[in-house]
Amino acid sequence: MGSGANYEKGLHDLGNGCFAWLQPDGSWGWSNAGLIVDGEESLLVDTLFDLRLTREMLAAMRDASPAAAGIDVLVNTHANGDHCFGNELVQGAAIVASKACAEEMGELPPAALAAMLENADALGEAGAFFREVFGVFEFEGITLTPPTETFEGRTTRRVGDKAVHLIEVGPAHTRGDVLVHVPSEGVVYTGDILFIEGHPIIWEGPIGNWVRACDEILAMGAASIVPGHGPVTDDAGVRALREYLVTLEAEARKRYDAGLPVREAARDISLADYASWGDAERIAVNVSTLYREFGDPAPPPSPVELFAWMAELRRDRR
């Protein structure tokens, strides 16, 4: 399935017991998830940003496969809430994540996002942008439910006769990113290592790890690649994201070496080749992260500062 093909909300059958749950348009918070079944066993890849959305997804999965009536294993690909805030609804499952993901998961709990929405007016432009992108989600009443099992490097789980490889490729997007590969079926679930038709956001870095993660996906030769955001894709989508990362690093490096301040650098880098991709304001975070990687001694911006800066870029680009 190429990029953009059949990009509709809901459960998509990838064949042979593998499914993708897609949430267009893939922008802020609108994440994807996955289901792998064989016989009576099932593994869920990620939950969603709130309980309402996760309940809807789990109901559709139960309708599609009896094995989804009781999920055996839940894998969280990383610690961002739009991939784990629905964990409490997957009762009885072993919840598996990388050790780094588990350590990061509690740093921005649902209550903190609820408070930011409640106090958005006091945060000025940052608060207005935060409400614009996250106001539709319901963070009240969520109990953060962390992993029950962690690993480092690589591990394998079995779903019936299927081997499912969990491959830690972070730190990249976050500190503990994991790929979920089903080699027998030619399917890989990438979490937020892949954003398709949208700009990625480099919260953590280093960017070299992210590029290597793209190379690892390409080496798998998977027919169906389920990104964290956006439509199901193939190798072309991976190569496009990889090229974005390589180009951004080179362009940011030139401006860092020339002594251009980080905010000016983010504005100066052309995104014309990616004009069709959404969420271009994320270049604020990406260049800030790259400057730190290059050795910028300035203290990292706070989340409120980053959201204010992204809001400014979003407004100006419009």
Image (spheres, rainbow, N blue to C red):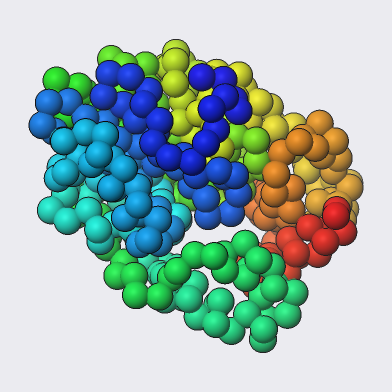
Describe residue 169's horizontal placement relative to residue 295 as left or right.
left
Residue drawn at (37%, 61%) of the image: 52
Residue 301 seen in render: no
The percent coordinates of residue 179 (x first, y second) are 39, 34
What residue is shown at x 25% (from left), y 45% (from top)? 74
Q: Nearer the viewer, residue 162 or 102?
A: 162
Q: Nearer the viewer, residue 234 or 304?
A: 234
Tell me if residue 92 comes above or below residue 251 in the rendering: below
**Is residue 113 placed above or below 246 in the rendered structure?**
below
Q: Is residue 121 above or below residue 140?
A: below
At 66% across and 26% down in the image, what residue appears? 240
The image position of residue 19, as x and y in percent, is 34, 30
Closer to the camera in the image, 153 or 244: 244
**Would you identify the image quadrant in which residue 300 lies?**
bottom right
Residue 27 seen: yes
> Where, by quadrant of the figure, is residue 66 drawn?
top left
